[in-house]
């Protein structure tokens, strides 16, 4: 389902079966920004179809929140200028050099290159794994990049977070909205979800400085700021600091 969230923000729901993440859309007066590119051509094209139905222009820009397949492998189906942090580009260059078939994926699973969780979902999304095409972002940055979309800005910030080294959040100050991709989640290490108290604390500290009322997480419903911080607080309580 595709929803309008505020005057300038829309989003398409996540889908657990194939691990499709939330895709975001910001309508500026001059430029429209898509947030994450989807996990396949089909996913990206479904998003474009929803835009058409809602009489919204196609995005001229697409920002990647991190390099994981479910957020990036739809990029080749989009005719938009793509933006990521440099670390995301490096990861995708590695993925683009891989060959993809059922046997390849089984081998990547066995060798730990692709976690089992991802392998299962990739097989759902791609009946023909050979269809996987990894496109590379065209513009890269380190630290912070501000995009003036006309009437509103999108501020991309690479932040230390518990999920991935290349996590970027997209802050829309005028909309008081924040897209965090998967940065709020634990890290998938092998086949286990591992939390990192130190990185979660740093992430929380940065987010506390940012003005937003609602947050979009990669595989869930949008949540109010208070709910996000309460969730972080619970996880920090569960993991006492190691030096005590
Ligand atoms: Zn991820």
Image (cartoon, rainbow, N blue to C red):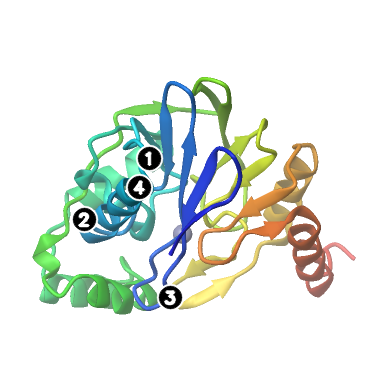
Asked whether disc 2 touches disc 4, contact meaning CB atoms under 8 Å apart, the reply is no
Asked whether disc 1 touches disc 3, contact meaning CB atoms under 8 Å apart, the reply is no
Q: Separation of disc 1 and disc 4 at Cα? A: 5 Å
Label 2 crowd bin: few (<14), some (14–19), many (20+), radius 10 Å: many
Asked whether disc 2 touches disc 1, contact meaning CB atoms under 8 Å apart, the reply is no
Picture quadrant where residue 14 is located: bottom left
Image quadrant containing the C terminus: bottom right
Answer with mark 1 or mark 3, whichever residue precedes in sequence.
3
Q: Residue 116, image x and y in percent?
A: 35, 78
Image quadrant containing the N terminus: bottom left
Q: Separation of disc 3 and disc 4 at Cα? A: 22 Å
- Which secondary structure lies at badge 2? helix
- Which secondary structure lies at badge 4? helix
Q: Separation of disc 1 and disc 3 at Cα? A: 26 Å
> Residue 56 bears which disc, if any?
1
Answer with mark 3 or mark 4, whichever residue precedes in sequence.
3
Residue displayed at 59% across by 65% down: 221
Above or below: residue 188 compared with residue 25: below
Above or below: residue 60 compared with residue 6: above
**Viewer-proximal residue among 173 and 207:** 173
> Residue 16 bears which disc, if any?
3
Q: Separation of disc 2 and disc 1 at Cα? A: 19 Å
Residue displayed at 35% across by 72% down: 118
Is the shortest distance between ligand 1 and the CB of mark 2 under 8 Å? no
Asked whether disc 1 touches disc 4, contact meaning CB atoms under 8 Å apart, the reply is yes
Identify the residue position indicated by label 4 in the image. 51
Identify the residue position indicated by label 2 in the image. 41
Q: Residue 210, image x and y in percent?
A: 75, 37
């Amino acid at each position: 389902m595709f929803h309008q969230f505020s005057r300038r923000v829309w989003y398409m729901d996540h889908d657990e079966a194939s691990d499709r993440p939330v895709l975001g859309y910001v309508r500026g007066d001059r430029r429209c920004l898509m947030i994450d590119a989807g996990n396949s051509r089909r996913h990206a094209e479904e998003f474009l179809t929803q835009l058409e139905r809602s009489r919204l222009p196609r995005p001229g820009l697409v920002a990647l929140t991190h390099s994981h397949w479910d957020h990036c492998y739809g990029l080749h189906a989009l005719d938009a200028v793509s933006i990521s942090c440099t670390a995301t580009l490096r990861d995708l260059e590695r993925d683009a050099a891989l060959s993809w078939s059922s046997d390849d994926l089984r081998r990547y699973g066995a060798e730990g290159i692709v976690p089992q969780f991802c392998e299962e979902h990739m097989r759902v999304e791609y009946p023909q794994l050979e269809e996987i095409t990894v496109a590379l972002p065209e513009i890269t940055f380190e630290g912070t990049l501000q995009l003036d979309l006309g009437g509103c800005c999108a501020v991309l910030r690479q932040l230390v977070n518990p999920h991935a080294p290349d996590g970027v959040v997209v802050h829309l100050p005028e909309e008081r909205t924040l897209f965090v991709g998967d940065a709020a989640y634990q890290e998938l290490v092998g086949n286990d979800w591992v939390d990192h108290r130190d990185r979660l604390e740093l992430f929380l500290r940065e987010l506390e400085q940012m003005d937003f009322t609602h947050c979009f997480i990669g595989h869930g419903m949008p949540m109010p700021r208070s709910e996000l911080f309460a969730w972080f607080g619970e996880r920090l309580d569960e993991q006492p600091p190691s030096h005590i």
